Image (tube, helix red, strand yellow):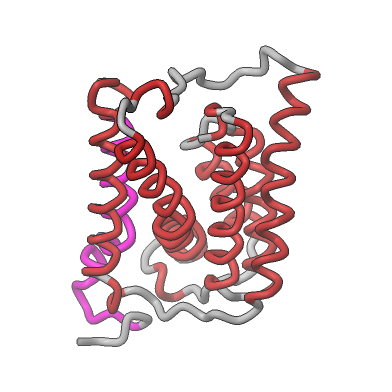
Amino acid sequence: MPNATQPASGSFVRNDLHYVLPMAVFLGFTWAGGQWPAFFVSSYVLKTFLAAAVIIYFWRCYTPIRWTHAGLGVLVGIVGIVQWVGMELVLLKIWPNYPRPHPELFDPYAYFQSPLSLWSFTIIRWAGAALMVPFMEELFWRDYLWRTVQAPNDFHLAEVGEPDWKALLFVAALFASVHVQWMTAFVWGLMIGGLLIYTRSLGACIIAHGVTNFLLGAYVQYTKDWFFW
């Protein structure tokens, strides 16, 4: 098999698919769960495991991940949860009607009758957000899409984390577009984009993303504020 950073002629579409398919699966089931509330729990479990399965299946096809600056990734992840929750609470206070979607909130404590079902779903959702989602999103947003902005004909021609203000803004904007808290997500995306430029390490971004998502899950469990989940 050719090196992932230098695909053979004619492999462009297949290499794109490696990055796009996990995100497409995840967003497709997210949309379905939003359209049919009775399908929400099943859709969440399915999208978590299916997206993870696709990533694992294609793992050797991705550009190798550098895992440098792990400590900085942890620090940025901690700053990220403060920024995410803090910015949303401030926005709600000073601009209660700022334009954003208002999805029906899902309270697992009200939905599940069995403690086993409740905690099984909670663990899957929490682990998926902290472990699977960071890999899926960082591979798509700040590996594939970032480099595609820089080299539209073949993203492999751009290096991971090459500084580019157009890529920074474009990726942060699209990242924000798939999040309910879109304004907060845009700022968070700029922060993680800055981490990528500074470290050239996708691994640091994955760690930061995972730490933020894990702590966000802890915040939701403590406060029962389901808007953040």
Dominant secondary structure of the residues highlighted in magenta in the image: helix
How far across and down, in percent of the image, does residue 62 sit? Answer: 34, 74
State left or right for residue 78 relative to residue 205.
right
Residue located at (57% from left, 37% from top): 220
Quick one: 207 or 60, which is closer to the camera? 207
- Is 114 situated above or below 151? above
Q: Position of residue 88 (x, y in %)?
A: 69, 31
Q: Is residue 99 visible?
A: yes
Total tally of numbered discs in the picture: 0
Question: Does the magenta portion include 9?
Answer: yes
Magenta residue span: 6-31
Q: Nearer the viewer, residue 200 or 169?
A: 200
Q: Residue 59 in magenta?
A: no
Q: Quadrant of residue 219?
A: top right
Along the horizontal axis of the image, is 70 left or right of 58? right
Q: Is residue 125 left or right of residue 193?
A: left
User: What residue is rendered at 23% in x and 81% in y?
Assistant: 8
Q: Residue 96: percent from the left, percent from the top?
A: 71, 14
